[in-house]
Amino acid sequence: MRIVTVALILALALTASAQVRDFGLGLIIGEPTGLSAKWNFSPPSAIDFHLAWSILGGGIAGGADYLFHFGWLESPWRPYLGVGGRVAMFEENKGKFPEGGIYVSGRGLIGVEYLFLEGHLGVSGELGLGLVFIPGVGFDISGGLALRYYF
């Protein structure tokens, strides 16, 4: 039974379409959790955006990242590296930001996206490490799972 299951998964992965569509809209669950959008403007390049609620900080966070997808893997799997930033506004005495206020950070990230349903649906997971530079210097971690529908 295990051999049949593995064979079916491999057959699905190898025959699935890796067609990349231009714009996707959906949800991200993690840190932060909320709305996610992605614009694939060239074969290896994309920009993703989020506007979400920060679970750890108790406030609203928004950000954008430039993504570079590796083209060496001809399958629905699309690994990527990215760089970007985020702005967050936290309430006082919440989570890891006890002072509240506005925080600005830059970040680098690593992730992978899987496309299926002829490229109309994408699932991705990513991890970002950030450097907070406003109001002071500190470190930040973010990431999660996103589900987007591509038009």
Image (tube, rainbow, N blue to C red):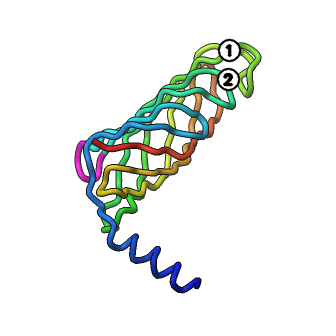
Q: Are marks 1 and 2 in contact (CB under 8 Å)?
A: yes
Q: Nearer the viewer, residue 122 or 58?
A: 122
Q: In the picture provided, is 23 more to the left or to the right than 111?
A: left
Q: Nearer the viewer, residue 151 or 77?
A: 151
Residue extent of the magenta highlight = 41-45
- Name above or below for residue 98 compared with residue 76: above
Verify whether residue 88 appears in magenta.
no
- Name above or below for residue 111 compared with residue 85: below
Type of amino acid under label 2: Gly
Residue displayed at 28% across by 44% down? 40
Q: Quadrant of residue 144?
A: top right
- The single residue placed furthest to the left in the displayed view is 42
Residue displayed at 53% across by 79% down? 5
Residue displayed at 45% across by 51% down? 123
Q: Nearer the viewer, residue 97 or 36?
A: 36
- Residue 141 at what x, y percent from top left? 62, 40
- Name above or below for residue 4 compared with residue 72: below
Residue placed under numbered mark 2 in the picture? 58
